[in-house]
Amino acid sequence: MKFFNSRYIFGLYNRALWPIKSIQSTLSHHQFLVCRSYSSLTTTSHGISTELLQNSGVRSYLNKLISEDYSEDMSKPNVSALISAIRLLKVDLQSLNEFDIEKEKDKEFGEQLQKEIKSHEEQLTKLELELLNSLVPNEEINCQDVMLEITAGVGGQEAMIFTLELFEMYNSFAHYRGWECEVADYCHTEMGGIRHACLMLSGSDCYSLLQHEGGVHRVQRVPKTEKSGRIHTSTVTVAILPQPTELDVVINDRDLIIETKRASGAGGQHVNKTDSAIRMHHKPTGVVVECQTDRSQIKNRKLALQKLRAIIYKKQLEQQQSLTRSARKQQVGSSGRSEKIRTYNFNQDRITDHRLSKSFHNLVGFLEGREYLDKVVIELQERANKILFNEFIESISKKN
C-alpha cells in the first residue's frame, strides 16, 4: 500500500466499498422513516437510545435478527429491507476499519476515513433503532370509521351544557381534520345543552387519533345560575367506538328485537304523530340501542344497526385485548369510562391532561377543536407508542 497515493486508494475504496449505492434509494427511504418515526426518541432521549443498543438482551436479540441464517419476524413490514441494509452497512464498516491509517502517512486520507466510519456508525445506529421500532407489536386497530358518543355525567344542567361544548369541539375537530361527519344521535334539553349525542366519523387516522379521547372529562367553573360564585365540578363521558364493517360483526335478524315508538323531546307535531324512533335489542349480547335522530324510520333503523354493530365490536376487542394487555398498560391507562383523563378549569383558563401530566392555557381556543386539540391528540398518540416500545424492549431484554 505504501506505493499508492491517497487518490488511488480512494478510487479503490469507492469501487470496493460502495455496493450500498445500489440500494441507495432503499436506504434513503429508511432514513426518512427513521426521522419521522424516531425524532421524538432520538432527539430528546439520545442518551437512552445509545444505552438501549448496548443492553445485553437487546443486543443479543438484534444480533440474532441480523445474522444471515436467522429469519424470524422477517415477514413484518420493513423488517426484511432494514436487515438487508444493516448487513450491507456492517460489511462496509468492517472494510473501512481494515484500512491501516498509520501506514499511509496521509493526514487528509485518515481524516476522511474517520468521517466515513463515523457516518456509517451513526447510520447503523439509526437503522437498528428503526428495526426495533418496526418489530414492536402493533395494537392499533386498523379502522377509518369511528362512532363518538358524548354523555352528560354528574353535575345536572351544567354537565349537559358542557356536553354540548364538547360535542361542538369534536365536530369542529372532524372538519379541521377533513373527516366526514354525521350526527347519529342528539338528545337536547329545553334549558340548553344535551344529555347525549353521537357522531359518526370517517377519515384517515380517525380512530388512531381519537382513541385516547375516551374517558371522563371533568369541567370546573362557576355556572351562570350560581349566585354565590361557587365553582361547580361536573363530568362528561366520551366513548370512542371503532366502526366495523358488516364482515367484522355479523348480526342475524333473528337475534334482534326491534320496536318502534314516537320520538320524544322538542320537534313539533311530527314528534307526536310519527312512530319513527327505533329501539333495537340484540338478544345474544343484551345490548340495547335507540335512535330517533331522523324523521325516517328506515334511516333511524340503519343508524341504530350501526351503533349496535360498533358496541358489539368494541366489546369483542376489549375481551381480546384484556387477554394480552400487561399490568403496566392497565396502570397507565385503558381509556375506560371510569377514568378521569382531562380537566377543564374555566376559572384559571387551564386544561390539564392527566395522562400527559401537563397543563395548557387558552381554554377557549382548545374548545374550538382545531390546532390546540390536535397538538394534544398527537402527543397522546406518541406517548402510547413510547409505552408500547418500552414494554417490547422490556420483554426482549428478559428473554435474551
Image (tube, rainbow, N blue to C red):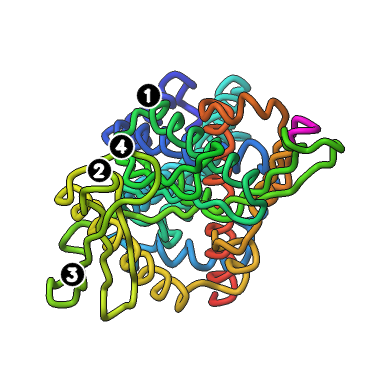
Q: Earlier in the sequence, mark 3 or mark 1?
A: 1
Marks 4 and 2 in Cβ contact (< 8 Å): no
Q: Secondary structure at mark 1?
A: helix
Marks 3 and 1 in Cβ contact (< 8 Å): no
Nearer-the-camera pick, 278 or 42: 278
Q: Which residues are magenta?
A: 346-350
Nearer-the-camera pick, 24 or 284: 284
Q: Could you give the CA–CA distance between mark 1 and mark 2, rounded to whole angstroms? A: 76 Å
Amino acid identity at mark 1 = Gly
- Nearer to us: label 3 or label 2: 2
Residue 185 pos. (x, y %)? 36, 47
- Residue that mark 3 sits on: 251
Q: Could you give the CA–CA distance between mark 4 and mark 1, rounded to whole angstroms? A: 24 Å
Q: Is residue 223 left or right of residue 56?
A: right
Q: Secondary structure at mark 3?
A: loop
- Nearer to us: label 4 or label 3: 3
Residue 215 pos. (x, y %)? 56, 55
Rendered image: mark on residue 294? 2
**Residue lying at 77% horizontally and 37% vertically, measured from the top left:** 222
Q: Earlier in the sequence, mark 4 or mark 3?
A: 4
Q: Earlier in the sequence, mark 4 or mark 2?
A: 4
Q: Secondary structure at mark 2?
A: loop
- Disc 1 crowd rating (10 Å Cα; few below 14, some 14-19, many 20+) is few
Q: Could you give the CA–CA distance between mark 4 and mark 2, rounded to whole angstroms? A: 52 Å
- Residue that mark 1 sits on: 11
Residue 195 pos. (x, y %)? 50, 49
- Residue that mark 4 sits on: 26
- Nearer to us: label 4 or label 1: 4
- Disc 2 crowd rating (10 Å Cα; few below 14, some 14-19, many 20+) is some
Amino acid identity at mark 4 = Thr
Amino acid identity at mark 2 = Asp
